Amino acid sequence: MSGATAPSWSLRPAAQADVERIAELKAQVLRADLERLGRFDAHRVRQRARDEFAAGYTSLIEAGDGSFAGSVTFRPAGPGEWALGHFYLAPEFQGRGLGSAVLGALLARADAAGVAVRLTVLAGSAACRLYERHGFTVVGRDAIDVFMVRRPAG
């Protein structure tokens, strides 16, 4: 994004009551990419969000006015490594710098802890460009997913 300022935002811990909102957002955000890959199943995508939900590591992204803007999960994934997942922004908040602002804040936490961050993104997703701009590199891929890692800065 050139010259745009991200809207104000905050993270709040997710609760079990938030899982359906996150599952719906995931289905909405991933639908086009999953359809392109021939993998969209409305029930399955929502059920995977429910099954993988981890309230202790998931945050809701709220816009400055308190409205629901998205979700993100950030959790330990092994020695010296954290995993970023379930990072979804509602369509009305995409392309405005919010994703970059949230990602930058999370990566600053990882850098302070001296840990790498790994993630998986759908092949061909526009999100790959966001992650590459923030220093992630591709470490593997298959027909559906791209696996990326960012080493700690410094």
Image (cartoon, grey):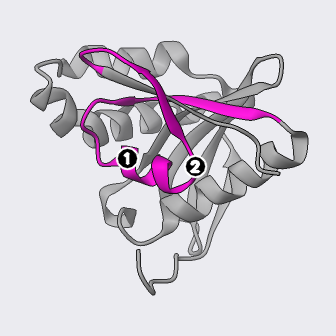
Tag 1 near tag 2, CB within 8 Å: no
Say above or below: 104 vs 82. below
Check disc 2: other Cα within 10 Å, few if <14, some if 14-19, many if 20+: some
Q: Is residue 27 left or right of residue 34?
A: right
Image location of residue 46, percent across then percent down: 34, 22
Quarter of the figure with residue 66:
bottom right
- Decide if residue 40 is on the left or right side of residue 123: left
Q: Secondary structure at mark 1?
A: helix
| Quadrant holding the N terminus | bottom left
Residue at the bottom extreme? 3
The one of 62 and 89 positioned closer to us in this rendering: 89
Which residue is rendered at x = 47% and y = 49% of the image?
132
Which residue occupies 39% across, 65% down?
93
x and y, in percent, of residue 62 in the image: 58, 60
Mark sitting earlier along the chain (1/2) = 1
Q: Is residue 22 above or below residue 4?
A: above
Seen in the image, is 67 located left or right of residue 111? left
Mark 1 is surrounded, within 10 Å at the Cα level, by few (under 14), some (14 to 19) or many (20 or more) other residues, namely some
- Residue in view at x 58 percent, y 49 percent: 135
Residue 75 shows in this picture: yes
Near-viewer residue (43 or 4): 4
Task: Please give the range of residues in magenta.
Answer: 115-144
Residue 13 disc label: none
Mark 1, mark 2: which one is toward the viewer?
A: 2
Residue receiving disc 1: 127
In three-dimensional space, the C-alpha distance between marks 1 and 2, rounded to whole angstroms, equals 13 Å
Q: In the image, is residue 134 part of the stretch drawn in magenta?
A: yes
**Observer-nearest residue: 78 or 150?**
150
Label 2: which residue? Answer: 135
